């Protein structure tokens, strides 16, 4: 059973790192939108191409508020925090119980 416990702990750790990395990419996307960076820069294009599919899906379902503020990065950030709190912790707790 310790093999399954170690596997679950490894999955929880990798998932936590990936979610944290994606959260920082979303934050970079917000900063890019504030400073109006060069859209032909390869780093800017990579950040936009990684975040746009998720942000677009959320933008479609959100109503437009006054001033045209985009709340989709805040919702993605909250979803990442929820996944880290619920999913990653649940996997880690399950791994501890299986040991």
Image (spheres, rainbow, N blue to C red):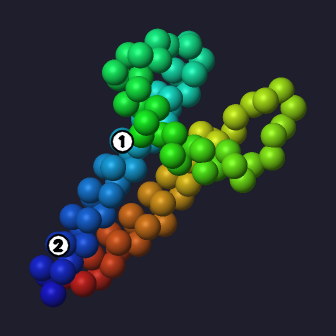
Residue receiving disc 2: 6
Q: Earlier in the sequence, mark 2 or mark 1?
A: 2
Q: Residue furthest bottom?
A: 1
Q: Residue at x 53, y 58 (%)?
A: 82
Q: Where residue 41 sits in the image (x, y, percent)?
A: 38, 16
Residue receiving disc 1: 21
Q: Is residue 7 left or right of residue 43?
A: left
Q: Is residue 71 visible?
A: yes
Image quadrant assignment for residue 65: top right
Which corner quadrant holds the N terminus? bottom left
Q: Nearer the viewer, residue 34 or 38?
A: 38
- Within 10 angstroms of label 2, few (less than 14), some, or many (20 or more) residues? some
Q: Is residue 75 visible?
A: no
User: Which disc is residue 31 wearing?
Assistant: none
Rounded to the nearest angstrom, the CA distance separating label 2 from label 1 is 22 Å
Q: Where residue 77 sits in the image (x, y, percent)?
A: 55, 45
Q: Residue at x 75, y 31 (%)?
A: 69
Q: Residue at x 64, y 42 (%)?
A: 72
């Amino acid at each position: 059973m310790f093999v399954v416990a170690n596997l679950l702990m490894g999955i929880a750790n990798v998932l936590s790192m990936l979610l944290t990395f994606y959260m920082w990419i979303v934050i970079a996307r917000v900063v890019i939108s504030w400073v109006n960076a060069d859209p032909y820069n390869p780093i800017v294009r990579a950040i936009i191409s990684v975040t746009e599919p998720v942000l677009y899906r959320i933008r479609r379902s959100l109503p437009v508020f006054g001033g045209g503020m985009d709340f989709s990065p805040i919702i993605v950030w909250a979803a990442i925090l929820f996944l880290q709190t619920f999913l990653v912790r649940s996997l880690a707790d399950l791994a501890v119980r299986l040991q």
